[in-house]
Image (cartoon, rainbow, N blue to C red):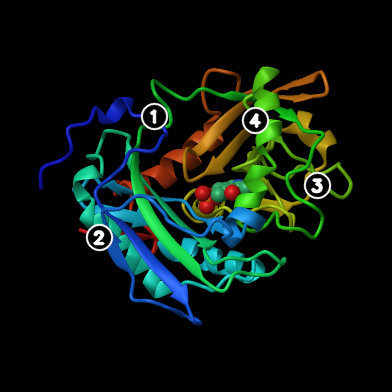
Amino acid sequence: MEKQNLDWGSLGFGYIKTDKRYVSNFKDGAWDNGTLTDDNTVAISECAGVLQYAQTCFEGLKAYTTKQGKIVTFRPDLNAERMATTCERLEMPVFPKERFIDAVKQVVSANASWVPPYGSGATLYLRPYMFGSSSVIGVKPAEEYQFRLFGTPVGPYFKGGAHPITVRISDLDRAAPHGTGDIKAGLNYAMSLHNIVDAHKNGFDENMYLDPQTHTYIEETGGANILFVTKDNKLVTPKSNSILPSITRRSLVDVAKKYLGIEVEERKIHKDELPDFVECGLCGTAAVISPIGKIVDHGKEICLPSGMNDFGPVLKKVYETLTGIQMGLIEAPEGWIYEIC
Ligand SMILES: *Cc1c(COP(=O)(O)O)cnc(C)c1O
């Protein structure tokens, strides 16, 4: 199959229209059969639930080419399960797991020419999402929904080596106590936009959010979970019911324990502990791990000993092991890699 004529290595993280996307509609209490379409536009009522009351959610995963030349995706079953949890919380119908995985396979197969080659560092980013498509004016769930899934090629996250970032401790919250912080709802992102624009204006790459109840424990950033490394090489990650259960974080924790014999603690992390850590990084599908070099807490700079030039040694090892598993260089745990073609 002929690949698209793109300079894969210099692609950014943006939307490029690919050939086919998957659409399925929920009406009269049931999902239709779903289909691939060329049409990348959506036509809905001006009063659709998504437009009035933000009834929408999404997922994110990648398709890529392994060393063996296979096009695969990583743990799409977990994206399907997480989307089901999100939908239940937003009073949206669940799109069944087998159908979610089938939609991933259909979209990736139909857009195989858009899946970047092995070694380019680029991937085909997949965006499954769902929204209330029928009219609502009184506040209530929509009756009809649309599930869609498209792919867009994205470039390597790190161009020319890792670039540790600077984050600030945020005064604003991304989630309410007992709210929606643990589901992948569009609304969590809408309300983070002001704060990220403000962070960038002030010279910070990201906001590190604290627990919304007491503002003392570390939670996550707007779109990534957080990992820390202690002086005695333990991996520590925040435990909270208002953070999003990152599939990358859960996979990294497994890899650290089972492949590398690293001790892992999932627990509350007080912000006063920050100066005790030797490495810190963000984790999510986009970067796998993005190292943090500096955390700024209201003018007080906490510089991680791993510095501003590279990953620290422990996060680097964990990063290389998981990306090695994804790319087919290291044997994967049962069920992690879904071969498409
Ligand atoms: C999507 C997301 C993550 C990362 O999850 P992955 O499954 O690893 O991509 C982390 N935090 C938030 C708030 C997210 O929305």
> Which residue is under mark 1?
12
The picture places residue 131, in percent across and down from the top left corner, at 53, 61
For marks 4 and 3, the one nearer the N-term is 4
Circle 3 sits in a helix, a strand or a loop, which is it?
loop
Vertical arrangement, residue 15 with respect to residue 110, above or below: above
The picture places residue 294, in percent across and down from the top left corner, at 67, 23
Q: Residues within 10 Å of mark 1 (few under 14, many from 20)?
A: some
> Which residue is under mark 3?
211
**Which residue is at the front of the view, 261 or 315?**
315
Where residue 21 sits, quadrant-wise, is bottom left
Disc 4 within 8 angstroms of ligand 1 (CB): no
What residue type is disc 4 on?
Glu
User: Do the CB atoms of the residues marked 4 and 2 lie less than 8 Å apart?
Assistant: no
Q: Residue at x 69, y 69 (%)?
A: 140
Circle 2 sits in a helix, a strand or a loop, which is it?
loop
> Which residue is under mark 2?
340
Disc 3 within 8 angstroms of ligand 1 (CB): no
For marks 1 and 2, the one nearer the N-term is 1
> Which residue is under mark 4?
206
The picture places residue 58, in percent across and down from the top left corner, at 52, 55
For marks 2 and 3, the one nearer the N-term is 3
Quadrant of the drawing holding the C terminus = bottom left
Rounded to the nearest whole Å, what is the CA distance between mark 4 and mark 3? Answer: 16 Å
Q: Residues within 10 Å of mark 4 (few under 14, many from 20)?
A: many
Taking the view exactly as shown, the residue that stands out farthest to the right is 214
Rounded to the nearest whole Å, what is the CA distance between mark 1 and mark 2? Answer: 25 Å
What residue type is disc 2 on?
Ile
Vertical arrangement, residue 296 with respect to residue 228, above or below: above
What residue type is disc 1 on?
Gly
